[in-house]
Image (cartoon, rainbow, N blue to C red):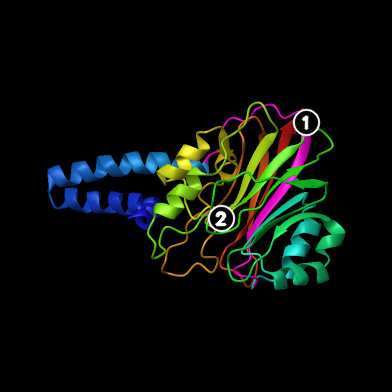
Amino acid sequence: MLATVALTPYIAVAGLLWGAIALFARRWVVGLVVMLVSIVLVANVAARAFPDSRPNGVGTAVRVMTSNTLGGLADAQVIVDIVRERNIDVLALQELTPEMVGDLDRAGLRALLPNRVFLAAPGGEGSGIASRYPVVRRDLTGPSTLRQAGALVDLPGPDMEVVSVHPLPPVEVVGPEPWQRELAGLPPRDLGGPVRVLAGDFNATLDHVALRRLVNAGYVDAADQVGAGLIPTWPSDFPLWPPPVTLDHVLVDARCAVDTVDVITVPGTDHRAVVTQFVVPK
């Protein structure tokens, strides 16, 4: 059921077609009910394709990138090239393996982002944060099956906390409970502390209640904010099945003004990278 929720944009469009067919066949009650429900869904989903109001951005411009490396199979050189070309300040990595750390450093990551909190591990358990600016490790999440690195980033202005997000997928054999618990364990905005940014593979779309609840705890989805909320991030090769959906997000403190969001394909991994620029207020 939770996996089906991710298909809400497709279901909404299919509902309009189904409702139209029912009306054409003079199944008035069925057609009207389906059309009304579908219109509500389409209105909710379509809003993600239009930019929201932007707060005035006076402060430090920061560029954050997140990439799920698929257990270290992603092309490290491409990731580093994106970091260099996009002038990335903070890189959040999921499924970070020790071998991937070596590949990234050989490709030149350490020269670009020398400060890091890496919790590398075999398979898909590891994660990490690499930064242009000094970092201090912070444990910002509740208990989780997969490692979710956290760090305090010492920006030129006010500091910023970052979490590399990766809850267990809800389709695992253990059921959805760990996914729900781990999403609930992500930190809300802290009005009395540094700006927080949650970046990574949430294994959830904005149609999932658990993610919407987190966003409503003081964040904005960067892609949704600039009208790019319907750009899919998984799977990256756009197969017929499963339909592409948006599982990778950068949630920023609602006090931050989001400028841009780009979604970029990285060879070797089934997740597309997300790059965003926003302003951390003074």
Quarter residue 116 falls in: bottom right
Say which amino acid is labelled 2: His
Say which amino acid is labelled 1: Gly
Decide which of 87, 159 is in the foreground and name it. Answer: 159
Task: Check if mark 1's residue and mark 2's residue have beta carbons within 8 Å.
Answer: no
Q: In this picture, which residue range is highlighted in magenta?
A: 50-72
Q: Seen in the image, is 261 located left or right of residue 235?
A: right
In the rendered image, residue 276 lying in the magenta stretch gets the answer no
Quarter of the image where the C terminus is located: top right
The residue drawn where x is 65% and y is 27% is 55
In the rendered image, residue 69 lying in the magenta stretch gets the answer yes
Tell which circle, 1 or 2, labels the residue nearer the N-terminal end: 1
The residue drawn where x is 78% and y is 31% is 59
Helix, strand or loop at label 2? It is loop
- Any part of residue 77 in sight: no
- Any part of residue 260 in sight: yes
Residue 83 at x, y percent in the picture? 77, 57
The residue that mark 1 highlights is 59
Q: For the image shown, how many numbered marks are present on the structure? A: 2
The mark found on residue 166 in the picture is 2
Estimate how packed mark 2 is, as few (under 14), some (14 to 19) or many (20 or more) residues with alpha carbons within 10 Å: many
Q: Is residue 76 above or below residue 28?
A: below
Closer to the eye: label 1 or 2: 2
Residue 279 at x, y percent in the picture? 73, 35
Q: Is residue 108 above or below residue 32?
A: below
Decide which of 26, 131 is in the foreground and name it. Answer: 131
Q: Seen in the image, is 120 located left or right of residue 219?
A: right
Quarter of the image where the N terminus is located: bottom left
Residue 78 at x, y percent in the picture? 73, 67
The residue drawn where x is 37% and y is 59% is 175
Residue 47 at x, y percent in the picture? 47, 39
Quarter residue 101 falls in: bottom right
